[in-house]
Image: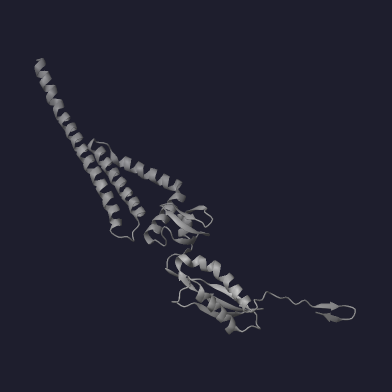
Amino acid sequence: MSELLEKIDMNQYFPVAIDWASNILLAIVILLLGLWFAGRVNKLIVAASKKNKHLDDTLFRFLGSVARYVIIAFVMIAVLNRFGVQTASIVALLGAAGLAVGLALQGAMSNLAAGVMLLIFRPYKVNDFIEAAGRFGKVTEIDMFTTILQTFDNQQIIVPNSQIWGDQIINHSHYDIRGVDMRFGVAYAESTDAARSVIEAVLANHPHVLKNPAPFVEVETLNNSSVDFLVRPFCKGEHYFDLLYSVPEQIKKALDENEIEIPFPHRKVILVNETTKELVL
């Protein structure tokens, strides 16, 4: 009788044990295949950036990580589903948690979105000199949330990407050849042809001024006390600041040597003598 009861008990629990064993085995297979697939997708997305040098590695590494974790999340839900866990409530809980985190990190999310846009459209890259968010410097690093600049006096400026993307961006390193705008004034009594010749001679002797395109030297404005020249020599991008800070002094010295007056603002004061009603200049 006892043997019969034991046999009945074995027949009762054997299908349950088989079902659990098959679920565990299938869950392990799903987990292993899911982890392999997630890693494979991550590698494929990262490798896509290496096929084109114009694509940014940082963005694709981020997208690869996002895709990997999304796949792992679905894999874990599928594994829990094999054991009869109601995954609908888990998905709803994750959605609510994601919404709460998103609301709490609005600033970070805006920086992240701006970082993605910067890495996609690439208005600048590392080692470019840019002016953005009221700052000027050399780009040393671009990540998903911030852009790091190095100033000429070796300060490090960390600028949130949302401030850069939402404002004007000036990339001083985009073109290989730059024009350097400078303005110089001479007195009305001086010959504009002579002043132009002196300025052109200075530019012709400068080692970093390009012959093609030729420098632009023309009268721009007839000012209150001076005739103002617009001077625009062209140079390679790396020599921009060398021209900007060396040419003005050289032109000043050349104009002095040729006795061409550089005027400064004059003001005429008229005094009236109340007793004699005479004008005194």
Front-lying residue, 60 or 137: 137
Residue projecting furthest to the right: 275
Residue projecting furthest to the top: 1
For residue 230, side relative to residue 27 (left or right): right
The answer, for residue 94, to whether it is visible in the render is yes
Where is residue 255 shown, x and y percent of the image?
Answer: 61, 77
In which quadrant of the rendered image does the C terminus lie? Answer: bottom right
Residue sitting at x 50%, y 78%: 216
Residue sitting at x 32%, y 40%: 90
In which quadrant of the rendered image does the N terminus lie? Answer: top left
| Residue 35, picture quadrant | top left
Residue sitting at x 21%, y 43%: 33
Front-lying residue, 106 or 152: 152
Q: How many marks?
A: 0
Where is residue 277 shown, x and y percent of the image?
Answer: 87, 81
Front-lying residue, 13 or 263: 263
Where is residue 207 shown, x and y percent of the image?
Answer: 48, 71
For residue 255, side relative to residue 14 (left or right): right
| Residue 185, picture quadrant | bottom right
The answer, for residue 219, to whether it is visible in the render is no
Residue 134 vertical position relative to residue 94 in the rendered view, above or below: below
Residue 43 vertical position relative to residue 223 in the rendered view, above or below: above
Front-lying residue, 213 or 1: 213
Residue 116 vertical position relative to residue 248 in the rendered view, above or below: above
Colour scheme used in the picture?
one colour
Where is residue 87 shown, x and y percent of the image?
Answer: 29, 40
For residue 58, side relative to residue 31 (left or right): right
